[in-house]
């Protein structure tokens, strides 16, 4: 994931550029590399844009046991799994083809034109 030039800073869940202007999930001109984003100070965190082979399962209101059970059923190759900002959910980043997003209850899946705030709180 770090090798991608699809990183941005964020203010809450809103993506912003290194300078603090709005970033767009459909405009790569507003994205930066990992090292630039880590050094920048705009906003209160950072995240990545989905697409180009990167997708994300977003699980809301899951405990560790439920997240592990869900991960065991995922068909796509898993790149990274983390706890979300709320501490009550998980992001499971996977390698996948781009497709329309979908939501079923408290489970969402996106693989293009979407921003995900990254916590780095790895879940194994």
Image (spheres, helix red, strand yellow):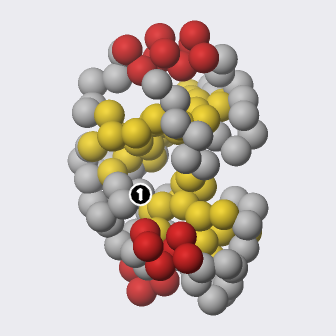
Depth order, front residue of 34/23: 34
Q: Secondary structure at mark 1?
A: loop
Residue at 55%, 76% in the rendered image: 39
Vertical relation: 59 (above or below) 20: above
Residue 44 visible in rendering: yes
Q: Quadrant of residue 21?
A: bottom right
- Count of numbered circles on the image: 1
Left or right, 97 with reference to 55: left
Left or right, 85 with reference to 25: right
Vertical relation: 101 (above or below) 78: below
Residue annotated with mark 1 = 50
Q: Quadrant of residue 28?
A: bottom left
Image spot of residue 77 (x, y percent)? 25, 33
Image spot of residue 87 (x, y percent)? 72, 34
Image spot of residue 80 (x, y percent)? 40, 39
Residue at 26%, 53% in the rendered image: 53
Residue at 42%, 86% in the rendered image: 29
Residue 27 visible in rendering: no
Q: Badge 1: few (under 14), some or many (20 or more) residues near its Cα, within 10 Å?
A: many
Residue at 65%, 31% in the rendered image: 89
Depth order, front residue of 18/94: 18
Left or right, 102 with reference to 21: left
Left or right, 105 with reference to 38: right
Depth order, front residue of 100/71: 71
Depth order, front residue of 109/80: 80
Query: Which of the image's four quarters has the N terminus?
Result: bottom left
């Amino acid at each position: 994931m770090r090798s991608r030039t699809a990183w941005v800073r964020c203010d809450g869940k809103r993506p912003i550029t290194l300078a603090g202007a709005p970033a767009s999930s459909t405009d790569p001109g507003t994205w930066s590399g990992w090292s630039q984003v880590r050094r920048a100070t705009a906003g209160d965190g950072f995240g990545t844009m989905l697409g180009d082979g990167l997708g994300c399962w977003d699980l809301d209101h899951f405990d560790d046991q439920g997240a592990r059970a869900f991960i065991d059923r995922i068909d796509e190759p898993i790149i990274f799994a983390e706890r979300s900002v709320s501490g009550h959910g998980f992001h499971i980043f996977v390698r996948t083809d781009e497709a329309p997003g979908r939501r079923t209850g408290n489970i969402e899946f996106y693989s293009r034109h979407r921003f995900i705030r990254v916590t780095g709180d790895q879940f194994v």
